[in-house]
Amino acid sequence: MEQQDEQVVNMSNDCNGVLHPKAIEGLKLFNKKQFFEAHEELEDAWRDEKGSIRYLYQGVLQAAVTYLHITRGNYEGALKLYERCMKLLKDFPDVCRGIQVGKLKIDLNNVIQEVQRLGRERINVFDTSRFKDVIWREKRVWICDRCGYQMHEKNCKVSCPNCGNRFDCSDLNIYFD
């Protein structure tokens, strides 16, 4: 039980970080319904990352491959990847690194229910408008121009914990790194 609690703590700590640049690109491609390309970018993020966050990226990339299998009419492949994907995503909170994981899981469930309803013989008539975008908010990293410390953003107010420098995030993005 202690080990599981430790995993949950580590996972929530990982969720507070910033999305890997390749994950951002993968999410953009996912939402353009370019599932193979999304898989490639997310796989690069998965390989680069350490810690439990890599399993979030792997889960999203397997969601992309699930959808790819559906578009190619591969019923068994879609079900198999869906199961793997859901195992990877099951312990993540509803929002992690700005990705709405809870909504993604619901969307995947809805898609796979329709695939199962259609069955192996009719998967080719699946309505791809059922593929919903992954909703995410890109977390920015702001570096203070006065002292070089990482700044914190809350409700579009950005402040440096070291020197007190402050600005509104709608100002010019001169602090964006």
Image (cartoon, rainbow, N blue to C red):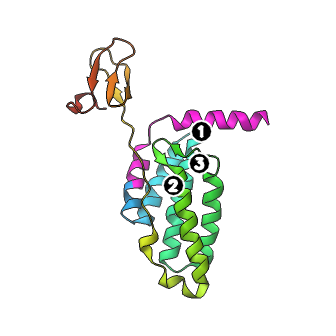
Whether residue 11 is in magenta: the answer is: yes
Q: What residue type is labelled 1?
A: Gly
Q: Name the residue under label 2.
A: 103
As drawn, is 129 to the left or to the right of 106? Answer: left
In the drawing, what numbered circle is on residue 55?
Answer: 3
- The outermost residue toward the front is 155
Secondary structure category for the residue under label 3: helix
- Placement of 21 over or under 14, stated as above or below: below
- Label 1 environment density (alpha carbons within 10 Å; few <14, some 14–19, many ≥20): few
Our reading of the magenta stretch's main secondary structure is helix
Q: What residue type is labelled 2?
A: Lys
Whole-angstrom CA distance, mark 1 to mark 3, is 8 Å
As drawn, is 86 to the left or to the right of 107? Answer: right
| Stretch of the chain drawn in magenta | 1-27
Secondary structure category for the residue under label 1: loop
Residue at the image position 61 percent from the left and 77 percent from the top: 116
| For marks 3 and 2 on the same chain, the one whose residue lies earlier in the sequence | 3
Whether residue 149 is in magenta: the answer is: no
Q: Within the image, what quadrant is residue 113 found in?
A: bottom right
Q: Where is residue 168? Give x, y as percent.
A: 26, 27
- The quadrant in which the N terminus is found is top right
Q: Where is residue 83? Give x, y as percent.
A: 65, 63
Secondary structure category for the residue under label 2: helix
| For marks 1 and 2 on the same chain, the one whose residue lies earlier in the sequence | 1
Closer to the camera, 7 or 127? 127
